[in-house]
Image: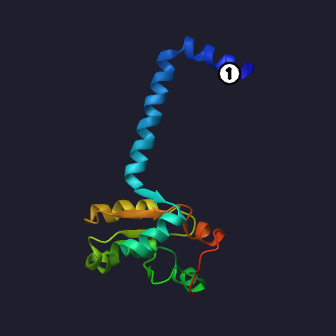
Amino acid sequence: MQFFQHLIEFIGNHYLLTSAFLIVLALLLFTEGRKSGKAVSTSEATTLINRENAVVVDLRPKKDFSAGHIVDSLNIPYESLTNRMSELDKHKGKPLLLVCAAGQHAGGCAKQLKAAGHDNVVRLSGGIASWRSDNLPLVK
């Protein structure tokens, strides 16, 4: 309780500093969100796949992809996305669902795909790890 009293006192005494911090934080969150595309949960991802025929692009290396992947997903490792982006041109207009191991590479890849003209690009929040933790099916 005393912490909040000190926090309120600090904000009151340093309102310009606090305001500047909040503005910078909001801009950072906004910029990062736009850059990396929308993140969807596993339930939202299954809805996209089943109802909107989303194309699942698995960004993991071939070895990891072979160990288990989402049904009908395309394997384009994130290191080779720039060279293999033309493979996705036939899917323009369809939602693209980007999946990586834990969500660390999908954001940058989403930015590349949006720059290449793909409008509806989303990434699986938590990657294939969240898919596995929700006990959703994988194909080997």
- Indicate the amino acid at tag 1: Phe
Query: As displayed, is residue 12 above or below residue 108?
Result: above
How many other residues sit within 10 Å of disc 1, few (<14), some (14-19) or many (≥20)? few
State which quarter of the image contains the C terminus: bottom right
Residue 117 point in image, percent of width and height: 25, 65
Asked which quadrant contains residue 139, the reply is: bottom right
Q: From this viewpoint, which residue is outermost toward the right?
A: 2
| Front residue of this view, candidates 89 and 38 | 38
| Front residue of this view, candidates 92 and 67 | 92
Query: As displayed, is residue 30 above or below residue 131?
Result: above
Badge 1 element? helix
Residue 103 point in image, percent of width and height: 53, 62
Query: As displayed, is residue 101 above or below residue 11?
Result: below
Residue at 63 percent of width and 69 percent of height: 134
Residue 118 visible in the current orientation: yes
Q: Is residue 115 left or right of residue 43?
A: left
Residue at 37 percent of width and 70 percent of height: 96
Residue at 47 percent of width and 58 percent of height: 39
Q: Which residue is mark 1?
A: 4
Residue 79 visible in the current orientation: no
Residue 5 point in image, percent of width and height: 68, 16
